[in-house]
């Protein structure tokens, strides 16, 4: 009788172990799944990153730009998603973002300070306007003075006529590296230069003090670098 009882207990223990093994395996699989999901969903940003990320994806003219948050000049523009325009600044020559956004309007953005070594950049949807490259090729030549162009350090300068929309401005062109810049002349205030380029559905308008043209090759490289950082070429 005792041997029968022992045999029954042994069979019962084996049955319990047989039921426990699938339960243990299921539990282990479930724990691994939870760990994997937790790893994938665990925040990877540092403290404060969710409310103030380093870069913001901003869509302008249907084109997405990866914009350094600290470079945005207007607080209202400091958000991700579609926008009509965004205004940025980059220190020269470091190209570091400008810093805390200012309480400024679009009109104030267009009247830039001239006593700073800063590259300003406005990105706006072009709305099917004439491309900057086409404007430089077909429009600007109509308004230039007929006199001889001057060249300094491979940068060719031509003056616009006084009876044109670009009166009191000069056009600077170089080929290696490529550069097309329109600059106001120094007068009561130092001159400001403007250079434009198109990136898909948006136009990028760079502005910087005319005095920086002495470093025009570095300026051209800086604008190329900023453009590539904002919207890497495919």
Image (spheres, grey):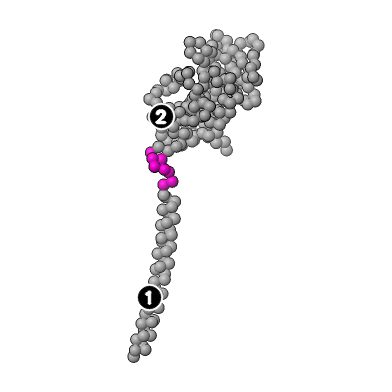
SS of the residue under disc 1 = helix
Residue 58 seen in the figure: no
At x 61%, y 11%, the residue is: 145
How far from the left and from the top, in percent, is residue 106?
Answer: 42, 23
- Per the rendering, the mark at residue 100 is 2
> Dot 1 surroundings within 10 Å: few (below 14), some, or many (20 or more)?
few
**Left or right side of 84 for 226:** right
The alpha-carbon separation of the residues under discs 1 and 2 comes to 67 Å
Residue 117 inside the magenta-drawn segment = no
**Which is more N-terminal, label 2 or label 1?**
1
Kindly state the secondary structure of the residue where label 2 is placed. Answer: loop
Residue toward you, 210 or 79:
210
| Residue lying at the far bottom of the rendered structure | 1
Q: Nearer the viewer, mark 1 or mark 2?
A: 2
Residue at the location (44% across, 55% down)?
36
Above or below, comparing residue 81 to residue 13 in the picture: above
Which one is in front, 17 or 80? 17
Q: Which residues are magenta?
A: 43-51
Vertical placement of 128 versus 140: above or below?
Answer: below
Determine if residue 187 is in view.
Answer: yes
Q: Position of residue 179 (x, y in %)?
A: 60, 23
Q: Which mark is residue 16?
A: 1
Residue positioned most to the front: 94
**How would you classify the magenta stretch by its main secondary structure?**
loop
Q: Position of residue 168 (x, y in %)?
A: 54, 11
């Amino acid at each position: 009788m005792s041997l029968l009882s022992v045999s029954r207990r042994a069979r019962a223990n084996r049955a319990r172990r047989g039921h426990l093994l699938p339960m243990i395996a299921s539990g282990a699989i479930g724990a691994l799944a939870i760990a994997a999901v937790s790893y994938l969903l665990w925040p990877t940003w540092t403290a404060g990153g969710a409310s103030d990320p380093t870069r913001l994806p901003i869509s302008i003219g249907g084109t997405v730009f990866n914009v350094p948050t600290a470079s945005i000049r207007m607080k209202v523009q400091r958000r991700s998603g579609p926008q009509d325009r965004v205004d940025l600044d980059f220190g020269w020559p470091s190209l570091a973002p400008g810093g805390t956004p200012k309480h400024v309007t679009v009109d104030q953005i267009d009247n830039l300070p001239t006593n700073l070594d800063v590259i300003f950049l406005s990105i706006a949807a072009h709305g099917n306007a004439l491309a900057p490259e086409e404007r430089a090729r077909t429009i600007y030549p109509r308004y230039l003075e007929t006199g001889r162009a001057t060249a300094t350090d491979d940068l060719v300068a031509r003056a616009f006529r006084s009876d044109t929309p670009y009166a009191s401005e000069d056009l600077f062109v170089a080929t290696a590296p490529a550069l097309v810049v329109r600059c106001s002349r120094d007068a009561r205030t130092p001159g400001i230069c403007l250079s434009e380029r198109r990136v898909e559905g948006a136009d990028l308008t760079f502005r910087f003090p005319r005095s920086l043209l002495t470093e025009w090759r570095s300026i051209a490289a800086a604008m190329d670098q900023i453009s590539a950082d904002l919207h890497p070429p495919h």
